[in-house]
Amino acid sequence: MSTVTAPPVNSSRGEAIASSSKSKQHTRFLPIREFLRQSMLARLGFAFAMLLILGALLAPWIAHYSPTVQNLPTRLESPSRAHWFGTDELGRDTFARTLYGARVSLLVAISVVCGCGLTGLVLGMLAGYAGGWFDRVVNLLLINAFLSFPGILLAIAFAAFLGPGIGKVILALVITGWAGYARLARAQVLKVKELEFILAARSLGASHARILAKHLLPNILQPVLIQATIGMAGAILAESTLSFLGLGVLAPVPSWGSMLNDARSHLFDAPHMVIFPALAVMLAVLAFNLLGDAWRDWLDPRTRSQMAALELTR
């Protein structure tokens, strides 16, 4: 009776497989590293954005005080060890209110960008792909009508009509902000739908839904995502403006705009009430603007080739 012996284990092959898996895991992080290496603006925007996100997520553990608890004996205190950013006119800790205000701003910005992006992307794609009377109605009557008004004034009008509240602020900003995304998506679809691979998909009998989802959407998504990154900054600024005017988040929920509104009467005797919320708004808007500009340069093949040529000449 003959015995079958197992072939020897090829250790070199196992090591090669393990090393290849490690290299694949390593290459997953290369795009992020390349993005951060491209310029100082990308690193600054990424650092500010991560600081904002971490501060908002870790606010209950970072802040030593509640953002809504009043302590009148300590009102209008200057920055100190006990209160890093000082206190407001009701004795509330400004540092805690600034951190929790970042939560409100990020929630509004993400919700508004998602709502505007999805609405504008769907309408713009359908208008650009269908053409005809539907394109004229969407482009001339809807997109141009919304873009003809100043965005912040239209948002103030809708917010005043709907009333204050974080949900109503998000709805007002989505209603007034979708048109820019729709125009961008429509323009991209008009450019891409006449290319050869779309004509080939049509000739092979692909349905309209498949062409839109499988062929057009992946090829027009890049500029829409770049606009969404920059739109985060606009949404934060719009929410702060509405809260400053009393049309945004209801008290006692902390918001950067409402904090600036409360600090108007104490501009000279307690300037810290203005400085720190204003710096928070400025850094948040600057972070997403820098991220959007850096991402646009990184995704542009011409700019990336120029950057690669500069790296080789150094």
Image (cartoon, helix red, strand yellow):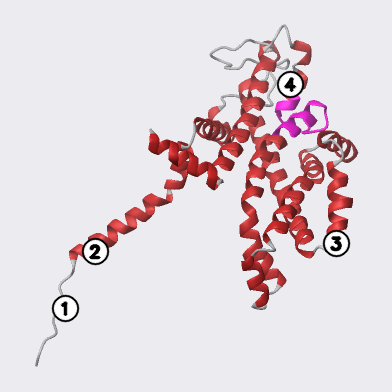
Circle 3 packing at 10 Å, graded few (<14), some (14-19), many (20+), is some
Residue 249 is covered by the magenta coloring: yes
Q: Is residue 97 visible?
A: no
Disc 2: which residue: 14
Element under label 1?
A: loop
Q: Which residue is mark 3?
A: 134
Callout 3: SS: helix
Residue type, mark 2 in image: Gly
Q: Is residue 74 left or right of residue 52?
A: right
Instruction: Please tell me which residue lies in front, 97 or 299.
Output: 299
**Residue 253 at x, y = what percent?**
72, 31
Please state which of residues 132 and 169 is positioned toward the viewer in this rendering: 132
Label 1 neighbourhood size at 10 Å, few (<14), some (14-19), many (20+)?
A: few
Find residue 269 and report its horizontal and vertical position in percent: 72, 6
Which residue range is magenta in the image? Answer: 236-258
Decide: is 43 above or below 30.
above
Q: Quadrant of the N terminus?
A: bottom left
User: Going from the N terminus, do you reach mark 1 or mark 4 first?
Assistant: 1
Question: Mark 2 or mark 4, which has the lower sequence index?
Answer: 2
**In what element is the residue under mark 2?**
helix
Residue in view at x 63 percent, y 10 percent:
78
Q: Residue at x 33, y 58 (%)?
A: 21
Instruction: Give the distance between the C-alpha atoms of the residues marked 2 and 4, in whole angstroms.
Output: 62 Å
Q: Is 2 within the magenta?
A: no
Q: Which residue is mark 4?
A: 260
Mark 1–mark 2 Cα distance, whole angstroms, equals: 16 Å
Residue where numbered disc 1 is placed: 6
Q: Nearer the viewer, mark 1 or mark 2?
A: 2
